[in-house]
Image (spheres, rainbow, N blue to C red):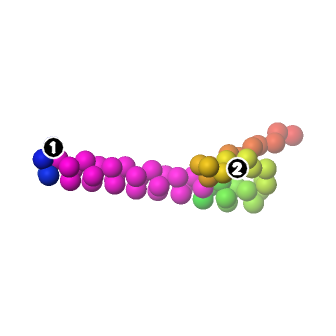
Amino acid sequence: MSLKNSEGKELNETLFTKAFETQHNAFLWVALTQRLASPMYLVSSPSAILLHKTILS
């Protein structure tokens, strides 16, 4: 693999990681702000993903 291809691969991985982190942070922000209205959440510690559980009345 040439140096240029290696740099391109690293850049693609970095951009993908940053895009994923941005999307994840937005998801966490929405989950956090919705928690104010409905405090029932399931937290998965290893992935730190919050799942909102809606209670239908």
Query: What is the magenta segment's predominant secondary structure?
Result: helix
- Residue 4: x percent and y percent? 14, 51
* Front residue (pair 6, 30): 6
How crowded is the residue under tag 1: few (<14 C-alpha within 10 Å), some, or many (20+)? few
- Of mark 2 and mark 1, the one earlier in the sequence is 1
The amino acid sitting under disc 2 is Val
Which quadrant is home to the N terminus? top left
Residue plotted at (66% across, 51% down): 45
Number of other residues with Cα within 10 Å of mark 2, as a class: few under 14, some 14 to 19, many 20 or more: few
Q: What amino acid is found at the position of numbered circle 1 in the picture?
A: Met
Q: Number of callouts in the render?
A: 2
Q: Quadrant of residue 26?
A: bottom right
* Depth order, front residue of 2/21: 2
Name the residue: 81% across, 42% down: 55
Asked whether 34 falls inside the magenta stretch, the response is no
Horizontal arrangement in the rendering, residue 37 relative to residue 17 (left or right): right
Which segment is the magenta one? 5-28
Which residue is pictured at 70% across the width and 50% down the height? 43
Q: Give left or right: position of 19 versus 44.
A: left
Farthest top residue in view: 56
Q: Which mark is residue 1?
A: 1
SS class, disc 2: strand
Q: CA distance from mark 2 to mark 1?
A: 42 Å
- In the rendered image, which quarter is residue 29 located in? bottom right
- 1 vs 33, left or right, is left
In depth, the one of 12 and 33 nearer the eye is 12
Where residue 11 appears, as percent x and y from the top left, is 27, 54
Q: Which residue is mark 2?
A: 43
Q: Does the CB distance between marks 2 and 1 fall below 8 Å?
A: no
Q: Quadrant of the C terminus?
A: top right
Q: Position of residue 47 (x, y in %)?
A: 59, 49
Q: Position of residue 19 (x, y in %)?
A: 41, 52
